[in-house]
Amino acid sequence: MRRLFTATALLVILLACSWPLLHTGFFRVHDYTHGARIVEMTQAVTDGHIPPQWSKHFGYGYGMPLFLFYAPLPYYFGALIYWLSGSLILSVSALFWAANVITILGAYFLGKRIFSSLGGVLLAAAVALAPYRAVNLFIRGAVSETWGIAASIWLLLGFVLVLKKEKHGWLILCLSTVALLLSHNLITMMFLPFFTVFATVIILYRRAWSEAVTTFFSTALGFGIAAFYIFPAFLEKSNTQVAERILTQYFDFHLHFLYLRQFVTPYWGYGGSIWGPNDDISFFLGYGMLFGLAITIGLLFRQAQKRKFFEKKSLITLLSLILGAVAVLLTTQKSLFVWESISLFKFIQFPWRFLSIVIIFFSLALTGGIIRLSGGILRFILVLLLLVVLLGNARYFRPEAYLDNPEFLYSEDQGQVSENMSGILPDFLPQGFDEQILPLNPEMLLLEPELPNQNILVDRTHEKLVFLELDLAQNIVFAVADFPGWQVEIDGEKIEHKTTSAGLIQVAVPSGAHYVGVLFSTTLIRTWANSISLISLLVLLFILLRQEKK
């Protein structure tokens, strides 16, 4: 009976936050480039460009190192669904479904391991039905951030399993670290300090020294596996225009701090964030969250009166409440000195992104308060009442409207990616690339000289090969944005190349008949990063095989 209740409750929670995805059409969100990213990821893998780093058609048709800097895990999954189904709309929808399923399962298992099966259901509802997740999914379209939230929950689960000395706890901790690092750069940067504090306090309280070692090496192994992405993403970003594109004007974090009243105001809108408290987008915590937190704080005061404030059963509740409050503070102007002191914070752009951290720890706090600090019939009534209120948040999980022709925004057309989507996502254009002086969506592989199609022998994402017959030595220009890693060969021999004033690859070719090719290869940073990932994967495989033998 208990299993039936749990399964039914989790299914209801899933449907409550996913019901618009059952619609045959699709909807517009602020960031509607997911389809284009899936198409480009699929194209790269099909072309043999593994791991995918270069996008062939973003960058106005000249290419861009999109997946070298934009966390790729959701688009690995999306590309797999696209390859299997052939439907781009289904693939985009699958990103949303997966985010919800992974979040709910992770929160349920986390709540179950810390509290009880009932606590797992309550935690799953509190996290999955948080209004901010509705904002991310159905207004902003911030799928990668939502995946990052899901991975963060699994990271906490892995840590709890390690504390409980469960056999595969270290593996879940390791793989969830990889998932977080490959899901969203900013959620990673925001969540890991909170996770570190959470884990450190609990380890010190429990004096769990051996578990501390396991936690450290499991997360370190996760970092090692994800090294192929995280090291180039951090160390090579100066080769792109990201700082110029996403840190100024509208994206200046000074314009997007929240006011405390916005957390308790049930306003709902489908617009954007602006300066001041009148954003046309909601940052409401939800009645369920506020109700649960109020009860939890009341129960904690009762514990304090009984001088049981720092007992074991209060620790996670109190710690989560404090961490959630710190995350709330970081969304407000009161934390300006922190934002101006930590240079990396400017890449977060919107202080309200810390709501991703808020909903995780406040959900843990309210679950702990109600499950651990109340008992008997009171606990059952509170959980039932809170679940009903939380399910009321289903009204937020809906788009503003469905599109009559969703294929226009979620298009498989390469020209659409080059001409329209590139302007929406120009963040990682190479330094020196200037789209203002170039024709958009070039039809030819070479801008100079023009070639008949039969002379283009290879035109894949990461490699191009042409055959030229020149009467005189000539500079040829590939319609490819230059970036560290592009290598040029003439008749199989590597040669140096130049970059044009517009940022394209230029090659000096002598007279005569020649095969001229360009290949997107590695840099020293990528070589080391790939090596670390390979070694880490081998270590993981070795540990797994060793465990199986035991």
Image: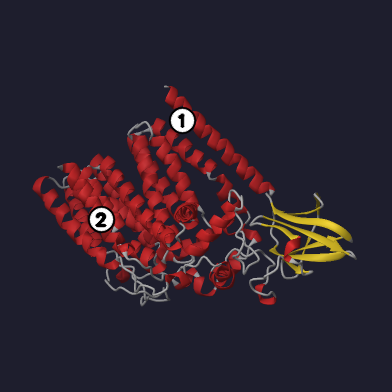
Most foreground residue, 303 or 286: 286
Residue 369, visible in the rendered structure:
no
> Considering the numbered disc 2 on the image, is that residue within a helix, a strand or a loop?
helix
Q: Quadrant of residue 436?
A: bottom right
User: Would residue 30 appear left or right of 229 to someone viewing this image?
Assistant: left
The amino acid type, in three-letter code, at marker 2 is Ile
**What is the residue that sits farthest to the front in this orientation?**
454
Query: Looking at the image, is 367 positioned above or below residue 401?
Result: above
Residue 431 percent coordinates (x, y): 67, 65
Considering the numbered disc 1 on the image, is that residue within a helix, a strand or a loop? Answer: helix
The residue drawn where x is 16% and y is 50% is: 302
Tell me the tag on residue 309. none
Residue at label 2? 13
Viewed as shown, does residue 371 lie left or right of 42? Answer: left
Q: Are there few (<14), some (14-19), or many (20+) residues within 10 Å of tag 2? A: many
Q: Which part of the image, by quadrant, shows the N terminus?
A: top left
Q: Earlier in the sequence, mark 1 or mark 2?
A: 2
Distance Cα–Cα, label 1 vs label 2? 34 Å
